[in-house]
Amino acid sequence: MKPLFLMSVSLCLLFTGVSHAQSVRQTLNHAIEQKTTITPSPERTTPQAAQYGLAFIFSSKCPYCHKFAPTLQAFARETGLTVYPFSVDGRGLPQYPQPLTATQDIVQTFYHSTTNITYPAVFLVNLHNRKHVTLSLGNVPLSALETTYQASLTYPHIKAQLQ
């Protein structure tokens, strides 16, 4: 339970500035209590799983998000990474029925804008320093997620963005 708490604190700091920390902290603590995050089974845990998580931003009304959710689930099982689902409309998907709400602060953090967002979107988040890189935008195949994930961990110019 302690690693989950540390991840929630890290994500809290990632998704907000100091002025918004309390409301996001409350949201994340509630999510942990309600088991909102989807944590892979312990036998699939990798060294990267302790350092990174996946922020998944979607809309329950988006047909591409519905098609993509099983792909993300398979990817999370394969890599051992925890998925933190964020819904732009506050409603879940069958695979992620109790998401966190993607507030304007969260959207701004990941997209650097609140006007031009694409979903589904997956971001690889360094849970220790709260830096992130985009893994996918739109309904991409599993092979594309695997490729961008491996690039994030191995290509120096991408890996540097997470350090």
Image (cartoon, helix red, strand yellow):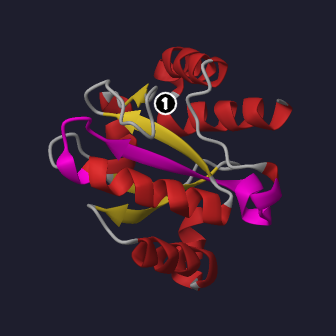
* Above or below: residue 95 compared with residue 102: below
Residue 19 vertical position relative to residue 161 in the rendered view, above or below: above
SS at badge 1: loop
- Image height of 3 relative to 142, above or below: above
> Where residue 78 sits: x, y (%)?
63, 65
Q: Left of 43 or right of it: where is 127?
A: left
Q: Nearer the viewer, residue 80 or 28?
A: 80
Reply yes or no: does residue 58 show up in magenta: yes
Q: Is residue 105 visible?
A: yes
Query: To which quarter of the image does residue 91 belong?
Result: top left
Q: Residue at x 70, y 38 (%)?
A: 7
Neighbour tally class for label 1: few under 14, some 14-19, many 20 plus, Cα within 10 Å: few
Residue farthest along the left direction in this orientation: 115
The residue positioned farthest toward the bottom in the image shown: 155
Residue 45 seen in this snapshot: no
Tell whether 25 sits left or right of 65.
Answer: right
- Coordinates of residue 54 in the picture (x, y in percent): 54, 52
Is residue 149 left or right of 120 when viewed as pictured?
right
Q: Which residue is mark 1?
A: 17
Which span of residues is magenta-colored?
A: 43-64
Q: Amino acid at mark 1?
A: Gly
- Closer-to-camera residue (11/46): 46
Residue shown at 62%/75% (left/top)? 153
Quarter of the image with the C terminus in it: bottom right
Q: Is residue 63 magenta?
A: yes
Give the residue displayed 59% in from the left and 40% down from the top. Answer: 38
Q: Quadrant of the N terminus?
A: top right
12 relative to 30, above or below: below
x 32%, y 24%: residue = 90
